[in-house]
Image (spheres, rainbow, N blue to C red):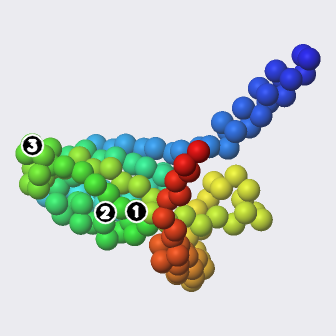
Amino acid sequence: MKRIPFIFSFFIIIILNAQELSVMTYNIKLDYPTEGENSWSNRKSFFIGQLQFHEPDIFGVQGAMPNQMKDMDNLLTNYSFVGVGRDDGKDGENGKTETFWQTEALYNLEKDISESKNVVQEYPEIAKELKSALEIFDRTLKKEARPTGISED
């Protein structure tokens, strides 16, 4: 009887460890070109490199100007984002608070069973093939969906 709680605890620990979510946040600092070496044009490649190295599932930025958002959108192609303007809750002319999330992930389970390294950028042709298959499946599923059943009992 003492083994049951131990086995149950063991499986709970395994389940919890299998579910990882990496999250990062940055105050990327407004883009003031007059700041010389601290201007966005000098910080951008390091910032993007950090995100590409760590590959967080979700990350947030605070204070992003429209040109910074455009750069992130163009350079971080496997992320989508949503957010609001810092001051007005709308266009973010004076900075935005945004949340980004990974939209595509591909893992080599033969070499990386823990799914720690996203290889979608290394194998874009496989990602494209899988995405196409998913879209076909989704269309088929919607087309062949049956109405919800109701039981009279």
Question: Residue at horizontal 64%, vertical 64%?
Answer: 107
Residue annotated with mark 2: 72
Residue 122 visible in the picture? yes
N-term mark: 2 or 3: 2
Quarter of the figure with the N terminus: top right
Describe residue 142's horizontal placement relative to residue 88 as left or right.
right
Q: CA distance from mark 1 to mark 2?
A: 9 Å
Q: Disc 1 and disc 3: Cα gap in Å?
A: 24 Å
Q: Which residue is mark 3?
A: 87
Which image quadrant for residue 19? top right
Side of 136 where 8 appears, left or right:
right
Label 1 vs 3, first from the N-terminus: 1
Q: Residue at x 79, y 28 (%)?
A: 8
Disc 1 marks which residue? 79
CA distance separating discs 2 and 3: 21 Å
Crowdedness of circle 3 by 10 Å Cα count: few (<14), some, many (20+)? some
For numbered disc 1, what is the local secondary structure? strand
Residue situated in front as seen by the camera: 140 or 128:
140
The residue under label 2 is which amino acid type? Met
Q: Residues within 10 Å of mark 1 (few under 14, many from 20)?
A: many
SS class, disc 2: helix
Mark 3 lies on a secondary structure that is: loop
Amino acid at pointer 1: Tyr
Q: Residue at x 19, y 49 (%)?
A: 84
Residue 116 on image: x %, y %: 63, 54
Residue 51: percent from the left, percent from the top?
A: 44, 56
- Left or right: where does residue 73 sit relative to residue 87? right
Relative to 2, is 57 above or below? below
Dot 1 or dot 2: first in sequence order is: 2
